[in-house]
Structures are given as structure tokens and as C-alpha cells.
Image (cartoon, rainbow, N blue to C red):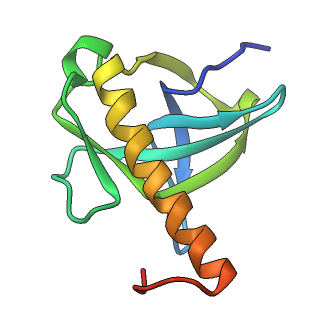
Amino acid sequence: MTAFRVGEAVSVEFPFTDMQGRKRRPGVVLACDASDLLLARITTHEPRDQFDVRIDDWATIGLPKPSTARILKLVSIDARLVHHSIGMLSQRDRGALALTVERIGIDIAAHLRGQAKTTT
């Protein structure tokens, strides 16, 4: 089985959020182990909120159009379902992704502790 890395863009069948279908599209690996991947969906739409991360170096890794990682559009899949690797996000794009994921994690932790100041 192919080993995937955090920050790698891959092509997978993403389920729609209503679970009524799926579409092959790119995703970025946020976490992985020997058999499963946690992916954030990549779209060609512009960022729409603070949870979307613009991929500035999209052409360098082989994405066909300007792209955005939607951090709240997550899926956990078996690594065997990946069609192919697209490429590794640039250091700059991985850094922007890391900041957004970190911010979401801090916000979730605050909510779980009952210490949240805002609602997300």
C-alpha cells in the first residue's frame, strides 16, 4: 500500500455532505496512519469563510485551476480508495493550512471545556 503524507494532495471519490452521491475530486491529507486518511476537500471556488484556505501554489503541484482547501469539509477514508497522488502542497500552503487547522482545534477544545467566547 502506498504511504501518504500530511500535506499531500490526492484524488478520491468525495461523498457529498448529504450522502446522496459522490464526486472524484482532490483532497489534502490532514492526518494518516497505515490504513486510513483524514482529508479536507479541495475546490476551485474562492474561499468563503475563515475555515477555507487558498492554495496559492496550486499549479506547482499539478492542480488544474486556482484552488481552496475547505477545512470543514472532511472525510475519513481507507487509503486504498485513493485514485492517485497529485503532489505535495508547498511549504507556504502547508503553513497556511496548519494555522487554520490549529485555530479550529483551539476553538473546538474551548467549546468542549465550556470556555468558548464565540460560537462557530
Q: Nearer the viewer, residue 42 or 7?
A: 7
For residue 72, side relative to residue 53 (left or right): right
Reply above or below: 57 against 81: above
Q: Looking at the image, can residue 70 be seen?
A: yes
Picture residue at 62% right of the left edge, 69% below the top: 109
Query: How many marks do you count on the picture?
Result: 0
Picture residue at 39% right of the left edge, 50% below the top: 100
Q: Looking at the image, can residue 19 be seen?
A: no
In which quadrant of the rendered view does residue 84 lie? top right
In which quadrant of the rendered view does residue 32 lie? top right
Picture residue at 20% right of the left edge, 18% below the top: 59
Residue 97: where, in percent of width, then height?
A: 39, 40
Picture residue at 49% right of the left edge, 47% below the top: 40
Q: Nearer the viewer, residue 29 or 26?
A: 29
Reply above or below: 30 against 89: below
The single residue placed furthest to the right in the displayed view is: 34
Residue 68: where, in percent of width, then height?
A: 27, 44
Reply above or below: 15 against 27: below
Quadrant containing the N terminus in the rendered view:
top right
For residue 47, side relative to residue 52 (left or right): left
For residue 54, side relative to residue 106 (left or right): left
Residue 120: where, in percent of width, then height?
A: 42, 80
